[in-house]
């Protein structure tokens, strides 16, 4: 009994510093209750000991060093230019249209407009004379992701651009295109536009047709159970919806 009482008194003395350091009078009754209960004293002391050990182990844990990847941006621009934009480029117009989803002259027009109106798409140089990402590279990053839905890792493999820079290019490209071309292309067609499209369709032997209809099937994950028989037909074993988009011959609307 004397041994247990002496150990408990030592534990109380060892934890009594909490009362001395406590600046709030509201906490004192709670702390006194804990110190007067031997079982709670042992539990509290063990918790403090484990916390001190955890702090010691975390302080000794080595910090991970930030990995620096050296990307030669000048070489990237040169390779991109030789592949698609040089007079004797490796890939022809067919490859370009399939991979960029537009013709080369239209893409170059977008690059020229953005680089002339926004500082982000202008060529900038470091203090040592080396340039940053070229306007051609930045627009290619955004266009390839929008056109083909590729990931940032695929962009990094070819264009040597990290994830954060890739997403930055995407956001600035989208905002720039909306600001420059939004009033002309991202609006509702007027009556003059409708009359023109009907006239073009009539000349192409499609009278009274406003535009061509393109459709695709989209899997309906939340289809009600009672409707699955109606929407899971043909070669599709899962419920699907048909999405339709009306577009003019030049993909304007």
Image (cartoon, helix red, strand yellow):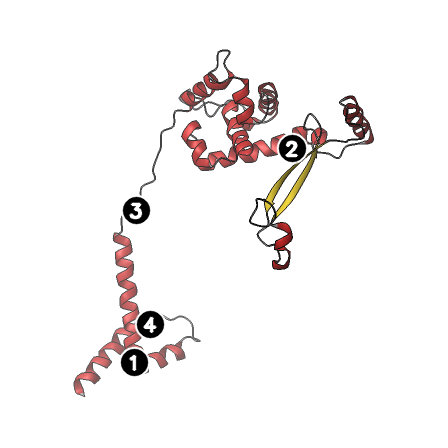
Q: Nearer the viewer, mark 3 or mark 2?
A: 2
Q: CA distance from mark 4 to mark 1?
A: 17 Å
**Image height check: is 95 above or below 155?**
above
- Classify mark 1: residues with Cα within 10 Å, few (<14), some (14-19) or many (20+): few
Q: Is residue 159 left or right of residue 221?
A: left
Q: Nearer the viewer, mark 2 or mark 1?
A: 2
- Which labelled disc corresponds to residue 18? 4
Nearest the viewer among 105 and 219 is: 219
- Which labelled disc corresponds to residue 178? 2
- Classify mark 4: residues with Cα within 10 Å, few (<14), some (14-19) or many (20+): few
Residue projecting furthest to the top: 87
- Residue 249 placed where, x, y %? 70, 26
Cβ atoms under marks 4 and 1 closer than 8 Å = no
Please tell me whether mark 4 sits on a helix, a strand or a loop.
helix
Circle 1 residue: 39
- Along the polypeptide, which appears first: circle 2 or circle 1? 1
């Amino acid at each position: 009994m004397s041994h247990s009482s002496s150990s408990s008194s030592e534990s109380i003395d060892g934890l009594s510093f909490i009362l001395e350091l406590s600046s709030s009078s509201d906490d004192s009754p709670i702390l006194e209750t804990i110190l007067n209960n031997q079982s709670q004293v042992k539990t509290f002391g063990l918790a403090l000991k484990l916390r001190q050990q955890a702090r010691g182990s975390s302080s000794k844990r080595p910090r991970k060093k930030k990995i620096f990847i050296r990307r030669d941006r000048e070489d990237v621009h040169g390779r991109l230019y030789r592949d698609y934009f040089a007079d004797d480029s490796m890939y022809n117009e067919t490859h370009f249209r399939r991979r960029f989803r537009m013709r080369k002259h239209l893409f170059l027009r977008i690059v020229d407009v953005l680089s002339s109106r926004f500082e982000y798409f202008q060529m900038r140089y470091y203090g040592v004379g080396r340039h940053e990402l070229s306007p051609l590279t930045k627009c290619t990053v955004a266009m390839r992701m929008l056109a083909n839905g590729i990931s940032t890792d695929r962009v990094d493999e070819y264009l040597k651009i990290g994830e954060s820079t890739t997403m930055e290019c995407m956001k600035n490209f989208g905002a720039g295109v909306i600001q420059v071309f939004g009033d002309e292309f991202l609006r509702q067609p007027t009556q003059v536009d409708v009359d023109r499209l009907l006239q073009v369709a009539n000349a192409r032997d499609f009278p009274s047709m406003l535009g061509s209809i393109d459709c695709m099937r989209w899997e309906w994950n939340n289809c009600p159970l009672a409707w699955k028989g109606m929407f899971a037909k043909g070669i599709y074993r899962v419920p699907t919806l048909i999405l339709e988009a009306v577009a003019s011959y030049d993909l304007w609307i």
